[in-house]
């Protein structure tokens, strides 16, 4: 199965290197490259490549927002290539339906395999990144509860949280209640305050 890939990297040399690297692997074809996040989104909307590889520093909110929009396009899957992987960004990627995140320090073969797996419909977050999303040993919340908390922190209403996580609204509300209860908070506002103080979000 051939995989058409769009490469986004704002640095010309890095973009060219990624393009040449991926084109060298059997079954991978780079069909385009873009220097800006919004040019990447425009290309994806017009051409619907199988996988969009988005390189970013790890803290760029705009890039993650564009990755979320691409992840919602039919026929497109997204893979983040991150220099740094902070807990909130990893959790946000998991919650938003982004298909994978790999480290820029990974071997080339691992990146190529991640592209193939994402195209096959798998989600590719290595164990280290999944652990990073768990916020630390003192956090009583599950990964799904943390995802709900992260979306609440962004200001998403319950219906939108339900849609993002493919839940019914009732189930999403149950998750919110479970988060408040597990944290020993008075309400969701208190839960968000506690989570910010403890750097869980």
Image: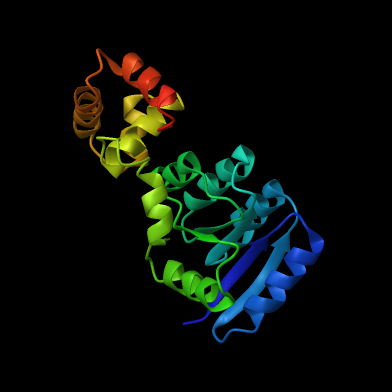
Residue 33 in view, yes or no:
yes
Q: Residue furthest bottom?
A: 26
Q: Up-down: is 121 above or below 58?
A: below
Q: Quadrant of residue 170?
A: top left
Q: Quadrant of the C terminus?
A: top left
Residue 11 on image: x %, y %: 78, 57
Residue 156 in view, yes or no:
no
Q: Residue at x 41, y 62 (%)?
A: 126
Q: Is residue 22 left or right of residue 198?
A: right
Q: Up-down: is 200 above or below 18?
A: above
Q: Quadrant of residue 139?
A: top left
Its colouring scheme is rainbow
> In front: 196, or 70?
196
Residue 169 on image: x %, y %: 24, 31
Residue 152 on image: x %, y %: 38, 26
Q: Residue at x 69, y 67 (%)?
A: 32
Q: Residue at x 59, y 69 (%)?
A: 5
Q: Up-down: is 198 above or below 115?
A: above
Q: Residue furthest front?
A: 138
Count of residue discs: 0
Q: Is residue 173 left or right of residue 66?
A: left
Residue 97 on image: x %, y %: 41, 49
């Amino acid at each position: 199965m051939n995989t058409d890939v769009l490469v986004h990297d704002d640095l010309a040399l890095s973009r060219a290197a990624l393009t040449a690297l991926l084109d060298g692997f059997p079954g991978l074809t780079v069909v385009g490259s873009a220097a800006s996040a919004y040019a990447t989104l425009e290309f994806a909307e017009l051409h619907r490549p199988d996988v969009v590889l988005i390189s970013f520093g790890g803290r760029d909110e705009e890039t993650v927002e564009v990755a979320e929009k691409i992840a919602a396009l039919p026929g497109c899957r997204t893979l983040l290539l991150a220099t740094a992987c902070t807990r909130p960004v990893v959790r946000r990627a998991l919650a938003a339906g982004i298909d994978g995140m790999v480290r820029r320090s990974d071997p080339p073969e691992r990146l190529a395999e991640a592209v193939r797996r994402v195209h096959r419909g798998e989600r590719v977050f290595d164990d280290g990144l999944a652990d990073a999303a768990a916020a630390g040993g003192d956090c009583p919340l599950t990964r799904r509860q943390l995802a709900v908390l992260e979306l609440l922190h962004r200001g998403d209403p319950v219906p939108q949280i339900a849609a993002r996580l493919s839940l019914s609204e009732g189930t999403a509300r149950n998750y919110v209640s479970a988060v408040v209860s597990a944290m020993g908070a008075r309400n969701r506002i208190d839960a968000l305050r506690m989570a910010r103080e403890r750097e869980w979000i």
